Image (cartoon, grey):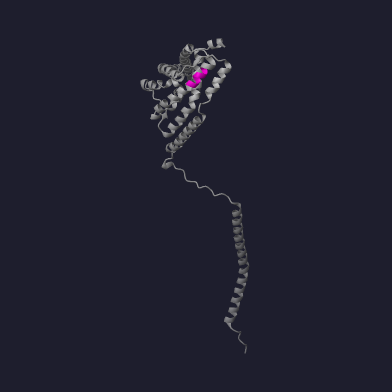
Amino acid sequence: MAEERESLSPTKIGLGVLWPAFWTGLAFKLAFVLLFLAMGIMHFEGRLGLAFIMLLASPVTVFALPIITMGLDSHIGEGAGIALLFLLSIPIDIWALGIVGRTFFLERLRREPPDGLGMTLWWKSALVGAIFLPILWLVVGTVTSTSIAVAHSLLELEFLKWIPIAERISIELTLWGSVASAVLIILLLIGVSLIGRLIRNMAQSAPAVSENYQGLITRWDLMRVPTDQSLMLTSLTGAGAILSVLFWMALPVTTPHPHECCKKPEVKAEPPVKPLESLTKNEKVIAQLSAQVDALEKQKTDKPEAETDKGKAKGKAGKDKDGPPAKKP
């Protein structure tokens, strides 16, 4: 076990602390992100979505963000919510680094975590990020633009001009994307290694733990249980309820509505079907129709009799008009 602790590289130590700290604080940060987006006080550019995730996820960017935004003239978004988000992320990062750091010191390094470990890890990580991340931003941007130009010039050679446009786009994207991604990954590993070295130096100056493995497990369990559980539950429930109410109060304001020229016609909902009423109505209609049919049939049978009586009446009237026949002398 001691050999395993000694064999931990700075990169493994840095990832072992930063990666769990990222997931520990991300849920709380995303709650504020959704609230600020609903309130309309924060807007990000779509092409820098990955950069936004990097800046939001890691505690090493609290000082690097203003440097990249103002010093390197890189516009990642607008709104007062960006600055407010990173200010609110500071206590979340300190809390997450404190929990993860104490667990990592006890479990992997078998060292006593010093007092104020979360605060110490935060300001050292932020200092490294303030120096290293702007360099990473410049290097990756320069490599990306150069790779794009080189890939485009390669495909403009005479013996490659026969390649169709769709395949040309795919080849260019593969060429410059592979180079830029490789450089980005290498630089990120170097940055994580720098933070890992700082953590290892802190661990070397810390005393070794006196408990055995069973004692360490007991300490981990006690670390997970808050001192006042009811207070913690009440605080989390109240904060969640307040954030939910604020979110739903702000959301309808920013919900897009169609323009007056593009409004859809109102569609009235059809009333629910009632079988009994439908059957009763159909019976009434059938009765009315049958009565009309009977009336029409009776009218047809009465019409010839009326015409016959009328003809007899006309004949009798003609005989009366001519008078009795004259007697022969």
Position of the C terminus by quadrant: bottom right
Give the magenta range.
98-104
Position in image of residue 201 (x %, y %):
47, 12
Residue 103 in the magenta stretch? The answer is yes
The secondary structure making up most of the magenta span is helix
230 to the left or right of 292: left
Position in image of residue 219 (x %, y %):
54, 20
21 to the left or right of 289: left
Q: Name the outermost residue toward the bottom.
A: 329
Looking at the picture, does residue 7 appear above or below residue 307?
Answer: above
Residue 152 in view here: no
Residue 308 in view here: yes
For the point 61% across and 74% down, the residue is 309
Position of the N terminus by quadrant: top right
Residue 122 in the magenta stretch? The answer is no
Looking at the picture, does residue 240 appear above or below residue 302?
Answer: above
* Nearest the eye: 250 or 124: 124
* Nearest the eye: 228 or 25: 228
Position in image of residue 162 (x %, y %):
49, 19
Q: Give the quarter of the image for residue 32.
A: top left
Looking at the picture, does residue 323 appear above or below residue 249?
Answer: below
1 to the left or right of 248: right
Position in image of residue 303 (x %, y %):
61, 68
For the point 60% across and 78% down, the residue is 316
